[in-house]
């Protein structure tokens, strides 16, 4: 993987303004999405109720908030997708098959042979990629 930095990169010697504590996904229902991501990431569900769920990761948390009018983002991106997860895996096809068993859907349009795009049970796209490419 190649990482590029611009000349305007922040000075790392200064203290950060904040640290990322949690990413929260919107969904119609919290429980199916919490159970899905708990299985995929191996993170325990530490809070689960109708309006909100939270998984605890090693350094971050994943929240799931119930939004009654939630509409899944589009794939491929037509301007509605705002972000997605890239997950490093040892075996692309085996990981994709397991995610599908857990409730994911493999999207029709794929970006090539080194990534597999799926949608979680709430419709959020995420990508599986070969862990060897990430060092």
Image (cartoon, rainbow, N blue to C red):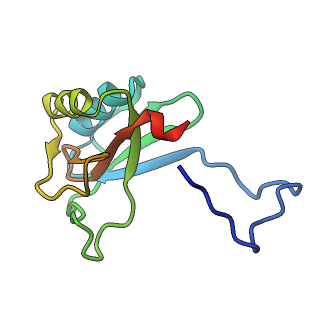
User: Would residue 8 be found to the left or right of residue 71 on screen?
Assistant: right
Tell me the quadrant of the picture where the C terminus can be found: top right
User: Would residue 1 be found to the left or right of residue 5 on screen?
Assistant: left
Q: Whole-percent x and y of residue 81?
A: 31, 67
- Identity of the residue drawn at 24% across and 75% down: 78
Q: Whole-percent x and y of residue 102?
A: 18, 29
Towards the viewer: 44 or 50: 44
Q: Quadrant of residue 45?
A: top left
User: Would residue 83 be found to the left or right of residue 16 on screen?
Assistant: left
Q: Whole-percent x and y of residue 126?
A: 31, 49
- Give the answer, above or below, for where 62 lies relative to 2: above
- Identity of the residue drawn at 60% across and 33% down: 59
- Give the answer, above or below, for where 36 lies relative to 69: above
Q: Residue furthest left?
A: 108
User: Would residue 125 be found to the left or right of residue 129 on screen?
Assistant: left
- Identity of the residue drawn at 84% across and 54% down: 15
Q: Is residue 57 visible?
A: yes
Q: Quadrant of residue 33?
A: top left
Towards the viewer: 63 or 111: 111
Towards the viewer: 28 or 134: 134
Q: Residue furthest right?
A: 13
Q: Whole-percent x and y of residue 86?
A: 40, 47
Q: Is residue 52 visible?
A: no
Exactly how many numbered labels are in the figure? 0
């Amino acid at each position: 993987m190649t990482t590029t930095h611009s000349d305007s990169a922040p000075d790392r010697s200064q203290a950060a303004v904040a640290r990322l504590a949690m990413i929260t996904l919107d969904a119609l229902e919290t429980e199916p999405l919490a159970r899905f991501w708990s299985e995929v990431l191996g993170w325990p569900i530490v809070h689960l109720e109708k309006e909100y769920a939270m998984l605890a990761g090693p350094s971050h948390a994943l929240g799931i908030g119930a939004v009654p009018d939630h509409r899944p983002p589009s794939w491929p991106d037509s301007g509605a997708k705002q972000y997605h997860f890239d997950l490093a895996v040892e075996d692309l096809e085996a990981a994709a098959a397991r995610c599908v068993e857990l409730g994911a859907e493999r999207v029709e349009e794929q970006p090539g042979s080194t990534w597999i795009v799926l949608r979680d049970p709430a419709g959020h796209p995420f990508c599986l990629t070969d862990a060897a490419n990430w060092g």
